[in-house]
Image (spheres, coloured by chain):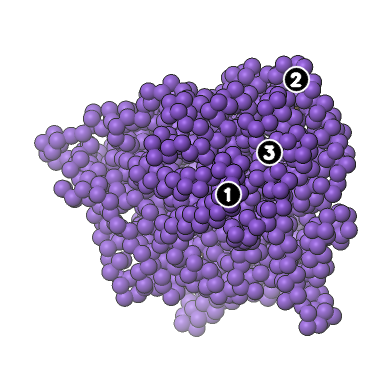
Amino acid sequence: MLAHPALSGVVVDSGCEIKHYISEKLALRHGAILPVITSEYFDSMIQRLVTEKTISIDTTASGGNTSLMTLVEED
Amino acid sequence: MLFTGSLITDCPIRQKIREFYRIDENVAVDHILPAAEVNVSARSRAWERARKMVLKIRQDQEGNGAIDSLLNEYSLSSEEGVVLMCLAEALLRVPDKHTQDELIRDKISQGQWSSHLGASDSIFVNASSWGLLLTGSMVNYADKRKKEQFGLLKKTVGRLGEPVIRKSMNYAMKIMGKQFVMGETIQAATVRAATKEQQGYVYSYDMLGEGARTMADAGLYLKAYQDAITAIGYVAVASGKNDPRKVPGISIKLSAIHPRYEFSHKERVMSEIVPKLKALCLQAKQYNIGLTIDAEESERLDISLDIIEAVFSDSELGDWQGFGIALQAYQKRAIHVVDWLRDLTLRTERKMMVRLVKGAYWDTEIKNAQKDGLNHFHVFTRKSSTDVSYHACANKLLEYRDTIYPQFATHNAYTAATIVELAGDDKAGFEFQCLHGMGDSLYDQIVKEESIQCRIYAPVGHHEYLLAYLVRRLLENGANSSFVNAIVDEDQPVESLLEDPVEKTQRLKAKYNNQIIMPIDLYRGEGKGEGEKGRDNSKGLDLTDINEIIPLKAALDNWFVDHLLNKNEVPDGSNAVMNPANRSEIIGFHQHASHDEMLVMIDKAETAYSTWSKTPAVDRAALLCRISDILERHMDELIAMCIKEAGKVAQDGIDEVREAVDFCRYYAARAIELSGDERLEARGVVLCISPWNFPLAIFLGQVSAAIATGNTVLAKPAEQTGLIALRAIELMKSVGLPENVVQAVIARGSAVGNTIIPDSRIQTVMFTGSTETGTRISQTLSDRGGDQVPLIAETGGQNCMIVDSTALPEQVVDDVISSGFQSAGQRCSALRVLFLQEDIADNVIAMLQGALAELHIGNPAKLSTDIGPVIDQKALDALNAHAEYMKSHGKLLYQCEFSDDVVDEDGHFFFAPRLYEIDDISVLKQEVFGPCVHIVRFKGNEIESVVDKINGTGFGLTMGIHTRIEHRAINLAKLSRAGNIYINRNMIGAVVGVQPFGGRGLSGTGPKAGGPNYLTRLVKEKATPDEKDFNFPADKTITLSGDAAENHQANHLMDKANWAEKEWRSTELNTRISCVRQLLAKIAHVEIVDDLADDLNHTLVLARSQLIDIEKRLKKPQQLPGPTGESNIIYLENRGNIICYADENVSFHFWVQSIVTSLATGNTVIAVVSDLFYQEALEFRDKFVATGAGKDVFQVAKQCHL
């Protein structure tokens, strides 16, 4: 399974000695570089189990900037 | 460098214009206020006159123009108004029915149309409402799940269905078109004009269309102008008036007759546009009609004055008095342009027409200045200041009536009344102008009662072009600050429309409008902390501002003189650094570090770590801020190095420095935030390996992040671009970077790979480069044994853009050119594969070919160069090999020519940009890192499968989408596995903190550079056990490897997980969380669990709180700050298929938490467990399946399957 192309990562307790074996096996793979996730704190485990996507939109592409054009000027 | 000759002007007025380009707003307003003053009695009379006019306009409901009625009914602040605008902009240009239907569904289902029916007296508004209502009530199914509902409806409507909807929508749009276009042809327009001409109006015709992107389009526009002049001339001559002031005229845009009407291409502009414009003028002269040059983007103003001066001074113009220009009052320098025009008319003893407008596209000008980090805006930030400027310019123009015929374009009754007062008895020395379809009532009063002429600016052309124009008009006049918007709003008292802008402005404490964020202040709201002031935006440099580029040129030239070496000045055993555009230029040399020297560096870095890691985070952050400041102060020399060492053009050099500056300030701020978490500490010595394509920005991005968090750094810049990296470190030291906190390693990659990476003292590696090298680094690190060493890798991509038939071809072409070819395509984010919907493919390809033909490939040191060389021989060889491969695997659509300044003495690395068509993305076996874009056609109804194909490459860096169908854009963005998605814009130039950058899968490990989570990988959790305490006995591997049957089972399990993954990831967050909650509830009743869990209750409590935490983080994606008119959001998604391992060394607590977290964040889980956990795991699985989640989302395997 550690060699399967669809794998995305392995979570294992940092107190578990198998973690070194897993990281060796993962490094042998071709393709994406995969993480061995051994977070000590569960909030950081969330961070390690997600990936980020940025979406940038030009909201003025069809016509113009409605928010700027409908701005009510203050003195 | 940059340009030859001098741009210094000997005309003091031109110099004033340049000084006022982006002058401080207070100074600009103070300067024009006195000039805008009108004496008190005239002001009172103007007020009274305007009041009567306004009352009359309000009474005169019938007289309101069509735009006024439309605005009244569909205000831009209403959802319907915005929807109408979006639909109008795109519908008529969509060629295929399928996509038209999608677009209509997308837009119309959003509004409440029936309430508008019959609410307006205008026949036109009612007609369009009928169209919208008819469709709106039928297409409430933008959401796919409502499709069934639509099916029912469809049955009821029977055979009518979609064709009727489409037809009625097109009908509604065409009604709008008819109302606002003067005619589809110039002949039709001039015929239609006759009615109003009899009432005392005249016309100026505008030929609709986008600016030309190709010479072919420019030729068509020129022909259209010529034909129009002939047709208008015919009418003019027939009138017998023989005076350009009394007969119809034409308005032209210089951007329509030339594809490169840009300051950077000044030589071409002067040699090619001047004769074209002159020919048009001579033709207009022949019929003695007026020809007015429309105002365009602010960065074109200076060059337009050169063109105007050249043509206007031409003696062949003779006694013709029809030459006109439009002048925008919203520019701070407008008043000086009036003086310059006056001076020009006196010098040439020729009369000129000057149309004074307030100025359009104000929103775009504001956005650009924010994006470019300029010190001030070049337009006023208040409407009232623009009005003051308008009055000031009007006063002057009226004084200059002996040589200038002023044409006051306004729909504001107060402005018009003031001008009538100022002009006194003169009714013929000037005229008013208004837009076709607007201000009818106002000008009926002025034309009939005051006998002052009004000229109507009338668009001519096909409806599909008209609508873009109309949308713009609606937007400009639907603005709350607009008089036209206010007058149709009966709730506003008449007096409120009559405020004197000069009086108002004099009273203002702050002339500058604080609601418009200054470019430097874009990121003030970024920080989380109380009283946090955010960070400064990096300063830009405007290459169209002559006052800025004259000193820049001098600085670049000086740097070059100081650093140019002879061959014999390069010591033996060193490697010379040569300009990739011209290898005869040597600008420095390097000596490579030896194996031993590198080891010494690691020692030093370790020593420095002990003090640096203890330096308070705020002090480290303060250093980074000082670094950013000194980079800004040394921008000139850093740009010079980008040009000469990396072969970049000047604009890329500016962007490079800005990005580096932003990185320093951004990480400084984030590091202070992170330092509040006591559980974390610095990691140690970090190795940073950066690429040549962003030799300063990525180099410093890595380094600043690492040192901000208390690590010390060995930084290996690319061999090709070491000079700029070394210079950056010098600058850092000069503002207090302690010795050995950052050391540069100048060496071959292989040497670093053999010496530094295997050294166990290296605690983290940051790498940007190729996917292959990334894998090699990860293997070398793993060979060290022990814990996995954190590796932040930013690797290759196969970046695609998807364009459907609703997209605006001109926008697409601009974005393809910049995304695919700017920086010679040598950006990680650059576009490689362009997916075009087949219905528009031929058209877009033709435009792309034409646009490529206009690119200047040459010496990057020149401003006029668009594309420079690639970096080195290796890059060039790879591109040439690709070109060879494409001979048999694709179709060459276009190949650019080199310009003359590609010199061949000692060689260079230029590669001609190419455009290809291929059958399928799979033709490309690897990333092509250079200026090549490959087009693939797709069918309109197969757009979703395009995303699947793109995801299938395994890469996931950037993706572009061009569509006006909102739900489609969002849907495609959701489906994509790319890390950065760009919608309706180009897909390069990610800005730090605005578009956090980085890919997934083959494209990188995350976290994103310039994003909120980057620094978390550069610190260590203090509780991490010492790796030396672990010793994995070799005999244990036996239980972990299985026989052939077990391997087969293992593969099958992972395949099933992978099939289930897409659906699980797309499942609503609420549903996912609910499934996991149910699982937890059920576990509480599993008896065998008791044996494993020390404290089941505790585990369950923590797991539930983990779910709340996950929900909080994933539910509300983070909005990032940025310029106006952009939406930038960072979303958190799953990773994919996760193994959660458990044996006797794993606590039950950790294992449950790992499963809960993985599942809730959208990952599939295969729990690989020893016998101890096996029965429990199976129970878990069954309980989870029972919650209704897909059956392969959570699976169980044994150790032998691992």
Kind of residue at disc 1: Ala
What chain is tagged by disc 1? B
Q: Measured from the top left, where is residue B328 in percent x and y? A: 58, 35
Nearer to us of marks 1 and 3 is 1
Q: Which residue is drawn at 39% across and 31% down?
A: B549
Q: How far apart are marks 1 and 3 (CA)?
A: 16 Å
Q: Measured from the top left, where is residue B816 in percent x and y? A: 47, 57
Q: Which residue is drawn at 75% across and 75% down?
A: B164
> Which residue was labeled with disc 1?
B236
The colour chain B appears in is purple
Q: How far apart are marks 3 and 2 (CA)?
A: 21 Å
Q: Are marks 1 and 2 on the same chain?
A: yes
Q: Return the mark for residue B42.
A: 2
**Frontmost residue, B606 versus B1190:** B1190
Q: Residue at x 15, y 48 (%)?
A: B905
Q: Residue at x 33, y 62 (%)?
A: B895
Nearer to us of marks 3 and 2 is 3
- Is B705 placed above or below B1001 here? above
Q: In this view, does B832 lie to the left or right of A11?
A: left
Q: Do labels 3 and 2 share a chain?
A: yes
Contact between labelled residues 2 and 1, with CB atoms less than 8 Å apart: no
Query: Splitting the image into 4 quarters, where does residue B404 fall?
Result: top right
